[in-house]
Amino acid sequence: MTALCWILCLTGIAVLPLRAEQAYIPGNALDREYEDYATNFLAYYCYDCHDDGITKADLNLLDLGPVDETNASIWKAIWAQLAIEEMPPKKEDQPEVLERLQFTDWIVSELERVMEDKGGFHAHREPKKANFVNHDLLFGNLPDGIQLEPTSSPKRIWRLTPSEHITRLNELINTEPEYDPKKPGLRTHGDAVSTNHGGELKLYFGVDRITHWEGGTVAYATAVKSVPVVFAAARSHGFENYAHFSSVNSAEATQILNKAGDILKYMAYGPGSLVKFPEQITDDVGTYHDVKPKGDIRGLPSSLIYSTKVIRPLTPVYELLKEPKMAYSDKEIREAINYLFEMLTFRPAKENEVDDYLDLVRETIAKVGSEDGLIMGLSAIFLDRDALFRPELGEGGVVDEHGRVMLQDWELGLALNHALSYIKPDEILRQAIVDGRMRTKEDVKREITRMLDDDSFRKPRVLQFFREYFDYDLGGYICKDEKAIQAAGVKTKSAALNKGMFRASASTDRLVELILAEDKEVLKELLTTQQVVASPNDSILFGKQNSPDDKAEVPKKLQKTIAKDAELMRQFKELEARKDELKVQYSEKGLSKEEKKELYRQFASASAKVKEFYSQIGGSRKQSHEGVTSANLNGPEISARVGYRSFGKGSLTPERKLATAPEGQRMGILTHPAWLVSHSDAMDNHAIHRGIWVRERLLGGGIPDVPITVDAQLPDEPGTTLRSRMRVTREKYCWSCHEKMDPLGLPFEMYNHIGLYREYELGEPVDASGEIIDSGDPALNGPVNDAIEMINKLVESERVEQVFVRHAFRYWMGRNETLHDGPVLQDAYRAYRDSGGSMKALITSLVTSDAFLYRK
């Protein structure tokens, strides 16, 4: 006890822990002042280490003062340290659970108050900070003095995610294939729009009708009409779709309005809205060659030829605009408004909404003419609130005795639809909403059960949960240093590795889907499966980095491969030369249409053989990485969902094999290259990030933010191991946090930074040892030899499963859990466990809970 604390005691001023006079409702902060409340708490628990005499971490709390904008960062740090029970130090007196909870709630309420007009205080609402809520209080018994309220979520409107928004727009202009149960892995209507070969999320116009183009990958991608997603943002680690995360600014609104015109024109005119020459729309390629511009047109829209077959949806917008008119009837315009409104908002327009848009269309027609006025007026629907946001306001509901309103009808139906889907409700759910059969918990259970059991009802939101939980889809966005790649054992370019990572993300998606289809012990299976969904080049990425002894034998093994490669290259060059000859002949004047057709047929045949040689050369060359022993990844053929077809030679293809990973080297998603590279940097592994992932996502531990005064950089010491360079994190000031994450990340040193398994590092046996400490489950604590041993321990823990349930709650509720959600989490965990680890059971429990159904 500090001298100040002793003096206060002698003078009769209370500094003992605060005791509640009545039951405390978490989140309802006490109405207390700094002088008569906070100073007492700090004096009793904190001044021993942070006063005039002792200023650990250069922090003197005697100088702190009440919460204000100048000291907000210090109070935030105090809140974090108290919430995760890092302070007071374990050897010192500890606050009772209730007083710790009351004081941390008080700090948050004060920070919210003083920062309200200065950008607000939101740190406690970040997904990671949900781990600051005591796990044992959520899943165990509460101490006396704490009173929970029936839970609910706040009234809110959610901005659509980039994937959700662009998938809605895609429905207007592209017809996706229906679900084929014989080919469950192929892209299907209802699946999210995939990124392209470069990891970009774009809406493409007319690619399903393109039959010919000039040039390769870049030229094709440049020539095709596309709209980049307006809400695009590089996906960072963790959940990205909380209700309070995003809004729509004026620049985004302007972009949406501009793109709406392009979409409406394509809905009306198809490729006719894209081409400069009508002859580009033909089933006879030779027709266009007679009129196409001279010179190099690669990368230009005029380089594309479209089929005459109509594939896009033909809608009331098409019927309205297909033929120019001097005037349009109200009935025609209303049909187009009704169609667009429901396609963009997922609900039918109210009569007054249709009237308002009709008046707007009439006004724009009067100003700029019939066709342009229609396009301009209808474009406004793309900016309707419900086309950009999902409202959950409890409109029309009855307030219960706890101040809550249950969602109903369209709000409830669309909330449920969004739990699984990116496209509008299917006809069964829509009819249930219209008939007034989406108003009770039983209604929700009926529909969620039906949709989860229907494979043809696509569920991209479920897959996206696993992407955001595991973060296995980020490897393609890491710009790897090419010297570092080659030092890791693979002779390839950074761009090629990035493409391989996008391919690996699609493969991992498919593996997740296969495990979800079985729906048994889902988390455990994902962490321990020996299955691998592999593309042809994955035998390298799943391979083993050769040891010094292995490398000595490689040249002998490669002689046949190199000879085969040389012969393939000779044949390849001959074909390329033949293609050039055909091009010259084709351009000669005086050729008949039949002669041109025959030359084009020969050219197409030669092009197909060139493509085949590329594949064979790639298969030959993948054996020539002398630093790698390839994995044997053979098995039945399956398919994985990928983006749109044919970006020249850069196309992502769906062909995969369901193989078995090398035993003893791989086990589960955390040992797959997709996850390992996603948790690396440009030059090396990132053991700290990997350790943070294990601490937060599996153990539910809280990690405070890095202080701004800390230079979080490892020393630049080429020729030394990552473990050696991480010695700086063991300094006293750093180790209090790093001891919770470094020993959890270092076991993954059995893999290098491009995901290869290794037994040696810099010529010495690799050290992949680590330790689980302060896990919250004493049975888990202790040393581990490598990542596989650590994973095998973790998957047997009840706590790990409960933490998984907490993350599922955050994703589907769009917010952090509070103590009031404890009963919901316990029910969800019980449903998961009683069903044998079923994801369907977990989702059903969550979306039928009060946290999902009620707003306040």
Image: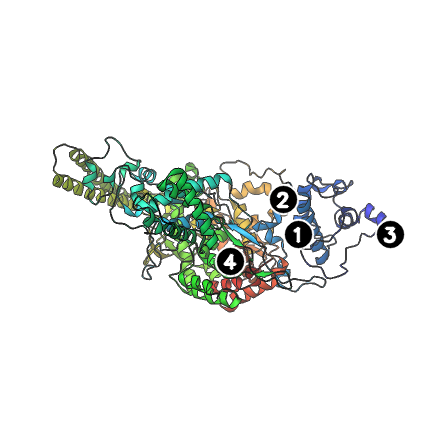
The amino acid type of the residue labelled 3 equals: Gly
The amino acid type of the residue labelled 4 equals: Glu
Judged left or right of residue 197, residue 347 is right
The amino acid type of the residue labelled 2 equals: Gly
Q: Residue at x 51, y 58 (%)?
A: 411
Observer-nearest of 133 and 588 = 588
Of the numbered discs 2 and 1, the one sitting upstream in the chain is 1
**Residue at image mark 1:** 83
The amino acid type of the residue labelled 1 equals: Ala
Q: Which mark is in front, 2 or 4?
A: 4
Q: Quadrant of the C terminus?
A: bottom right
Q: Position of residue 514 (x, y in %)?
A: 40, 60
Q: Is residue 526 above or below residue 328?
A: below
Can the viewer see residue 75 in this picture? yes
Distance (Cα) linking label 3 and label 1: 29 Å
Q: Residues within 10 Å of mark 3 (few under 14, many from 20)?
A: few
Classify mark 1: helix, strand or loop. helix
Distance (Cα) linking label 3 and label 4: 57 Å
**Residue at image mark 2:** 120
Distance (Cα) linking label 2 and label 1: 20 Å
Distance (Cα) linking label 2 and label 4: 28 Å
Can the viewer see residue 197 in this picture? no
**Residue at image mark 3:** 12
**Residue at image mark 4:** 411
Of the numbered discs 3 and 4, the one sitting upstream in the chain is 3
Classify mark 3: helix, strand or loop. loop
Q: Position of residue 101 (x, y in %)?
A: 69, 55
- Quadrant in which residue 136 is drawn: bottom right
Observer-nearest of 462 and 720 = 462
